[in-house]
Amino acid sequence: MRGLNNAQKRAPWLLLAPFLTLFLLTMVLPVIYAIGQSFTKVERTGLFGEGGISSSFAGLQNYERALADDAFLASVGRVLLFGIVQVPVMILSVTVLALLLESASAKWPSFFRAAYFIPYGIPGVIASILWSFLYLPGFSPIVAGLDKLGIGVDFLGEGTVLWSIANIVTWTYAGYNMLIVIAQLKAIPGEVYEAAKVDGAGPLRVALSVQLPLIRPALVLTTVFSIIGTLQLFAEPQVLRTVSSAIDAKYTPNFAAYSSAFTYSDYGVASAQAVLIALAAFVLSFAFLRLTGRKEP
Amino acid sequence: MSTSVRPESERLATTGAISREKKSATKPPRLSRIAVMVILVAAALYFLAPVYWVVVAATKSTDELFTTNGFWFASNAFGQLVENVSSVFSYDGGVFVRWFANSMVYAGGGALVATYIAAAGGYALAVYDFPGKNGVFGLVLGGVLVPATATALPLFLMFSQFGLADSYLGVLLPSFVSPFGFFLCRIFAQSVVPPALVEAARLDGAGEMKIFHTFGLRLMAPALVTVFLFQFVGIWNNYLLPLIMLADEKLYPITLGLVNWRNQTDRLPEFYELTTGGVLVSVVPLIILMIVLQRFWRGGLTEGSVK
């Protein structure tokens, strides 16, 4: 620190000030506020609340109420099931597509890469609107086509709509995840391939024992992002709700938190639910990172 | 380190030659080439068919949407397209144009400010050594992992008390913060801003802020484009925050506005026409942006985990 003048000591804080101020205001404070709210109970006194509102410490009451709600628990189970199926299916397809695109057998890789990436530019809500039309009987050419083939599918039914949502999510994010995997594939030095060839490894062998281990970090990263994304599911079910009676206002945990706040004006329980979702995201992400444990050489 | 942010064209110039050589040297058997092609084409159909459908749907009247084959154009497609698009723009006194402009303000303004302050912060961590540096780093790292939806509700409750809810600032302020951009900038500044250069500039009498603005920003430019793009699309696609924050339809971004239209199709069938036309108009600029700037959409993401 010797030889630093005052300007040099002040400079980093001056540069950091705008970011840190906004970071504290829009991320740290809301988290603290949500935690505070989740332990607070708001009571209206008087029959119609005319006696004013008073808030007091609620202990774990809001959490108890959140966890005692069967619909909320069901929504948690639903996104877990969703995650267990959709995340592996997407990551696996993405890996296969990336490996094929980078293989010697692929023609026009940059065209295909762009084609797969396009849906990422379409906001999740807009994608949901779009697919909501494509799921709608009497309107969708896909439903009509399947009907003609004698396959009657109800994309919006009780048992199917969750997978229709999974399709929207996969369609939107697969190309983006693929790009992350491809970026890492491209970073593999040419000598590695040369060495594998000298050892007489075929393309499949190269993919399984050279490329897959080397793109592991990208796969771990995309999986963690997908897990966090799954827990936050909101826009897709909210849009599809207008066409599917199988979706209720507590279909996903996030949807339940939103409904608690804006339909039932129960901010305490809504905050408790938001905190639980964030905690679940942390725990699952760390558990997955732990499980796949990076072995430092 | 800088490789991951290097533009694709440059990358191809160096590694492309090798891989092309590799390809011609061992040409895979015909059968495997056909099999790969079939899979790639099938995947392309899956990703592009819905986009194609929107294009077709936007050329139809509401009646035709229900009666004609959804994957093919009806007669007078072009005339109907013009009519649909113009009704998208003129409906309700041009509210769609207003939503579009709002989205541009939120995403463009938000991403611009976010990139600048993330660059300043990341540069500060990379170039200076100061007490509290690790604390700042750890704090922001925690921020990356906080799900955006967990902060939306408390933000609304807080902002309502300051009178910031239901205003442009209510959506903009949270959009100014990109912890991910902060990290990318720090990593990039570490590898492209040489300490010797900073020292030399100081000897020339340049102030610390001036060094950042003249050298730092310019050297970090490639990473800044990536940060800007990620943040732009992130804000453009964000739905929950504006949904919670905004009540006034005039402040809506395009996503909220279109959902609003979509929800009215049940009662008023003419909204089918408006919604499909609106979806097309809103999607086209973003798709062009994605394709043109595809080379900037890369890692930096995998940066931290590669090592």
Image (cartoon, coloured by chain):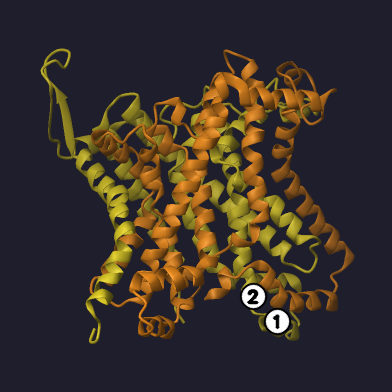
Say few, some or many: other residues with alpha carbon within 10 Å of mark 2 (under 14 / 14 to 19 / 20 or more).
Answer: some
For the colour orange, the matching chain is B
- The answer to which of marks 2 and 1 sits earlier in the sequence is 1
At a point 32% along the width and 41% down the height, the residue shown is A274
Q: Residue A11 in the image: x percent, y percent?
A: 29, 71
Asked if the residues shown at circle 2 and circle 1 are in contact, with their CB atoms under 8 angstroms apart, the answer is: yes
CA gap, disc 2 and disc 1 = 8 Å
What is the count of numbered marks? 2
User: Residue A272 placed where, x, y %?
Assistant: 27, 39
Viewport quadrant of the N terminus of chain A: bottom left
Q: Chain of mark 1?
A: A
Q: Residue furthest right?
A: B30
Name the residue: 56% across, 68% down.
B5
Q: Nearer the viewer, residue A276 or A291?
A: A276
Residue that numbered label 1 is attached to? A196
Q: Who is closer to the viewer here, B203 or B11?
A: B203
Q: Is residue B217 left or right of residue A15?
A: right
Can you identify the residue that label 2 sits on? Answer: A210
Q: Amino acid at mark 1?
A: Ala
- Can see residue A105? yes
Q: Are marks 2 and 1 on the same chain?
A: yes
Above or below, A117 relative to A183: above
Decide if residue B150 is on the left or right side of residue A209: left
The yellow chain is A
Q: Does A48 appear above or below B182? A: above
In the image, residue B13 above or below residue A191: above
- Image-quadrant location for residue A123: top right
